[in-house]
Amino acid sequence: MKKPLEFAHQVLKEVIKSDDIVVDATMGNGYDTLFLSNLTAHVFAFDVQNEALLATEKRLSAAGKNVIKISASENEKLLTENSSVKLILDGHENVRKYIKQPIKAAIFNLGYLPKADKTVITKPDTTLTALSALTDLLVIGGRIALMIYYGHEGGEQEKNAVIHWVSGLDQKVWEVFTYGPLNQVHTPPILVILEKK
């Protein structure tokens, strides 16, 4: 049986083509960014922590990917660097500052950066702002995968906020599914998948 993150990658891979624009809303250590960059060169990856950006840059450079780093004040670079993976040092709630065109897919890993400051976490308000923007940008047939890690302080509130928000999406426009184990004693991550009809 596939783990939730493996399943998230599978459902995104099914729809992403080489010319699609995709988003890693929480780049972390760069695993999802690298995964997306193997499917398309048009990747926008966001994180608020510089150490996440540096770790992701190192991972992508080792894989031979063309990377450009962008801070919140440098979004003009996006106009000239079409075939680079864009690592953006900014919160995902500001996605609209950087992306104007339709996207095919996005992925979130909600929680904190592993092996880093566990007090720096994703928050319900910024996550829902980003999710609202990305659902607006998503093309028909596009998908968004949300890996929800919630075994930390503040995680349960974010999980509940996201589940409540996606549960309210119009079923005529959206397919919304969850995937995750039900019999584990700890707080295993939950995958939420959205697809625009």
Image (tube, grey):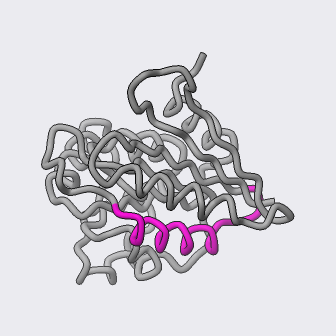
Residue 64 vs 120, above or below: the answer is above
* Residue shown at the point (21%, 51%) measured from the top left: 52
**x and y, in percent, of residue 84 in the image:** 38, 59
* Residue closer to the observer: 132 or 74: 132
* Residue closer to the observer: 78 or 99: 99
Residue 27 vs 164, above or below: the answer is above
Q: Residue furthest top?
A: 1
Q: Reply yes or no: does residue 139 show up in magenta.
A: yes
Q: Residue furthest right?
A: 172
Q: Reply yes or no: does residue 150 show up in magenta.
A: no
* Residue closer to the observer: 49 or 16: 49
**x and y, in percent, of residue 116 in the image:** 14, 44
**x and y, in percent, of residue 73 in the image:** 23, 83
| Residue range corresponding to the magenta coloring | 123-141
* Magenta portion: prevailing SS class: helix
* Residue closer to the observer: 137 or 70: 137
* Residue shown at the point (60%, 50%) measured from the top left: 18
**x and y, in percent, of residue 163 in the image:** 58, 55
Q: Quadrant of the N terminus?
A: top right
Q: Quadrant of the C terminus?
A: bottom right
* Count of numbered circles on the image: 0
Q: Give the left or right position of residue 53, taking residue 143 as reference.
A: left
* Residue shown at the point (48%, 75%) measured from the top left: 99
Q: Give the left or right position of residue 187, taking residue 169 as reference.
A: left
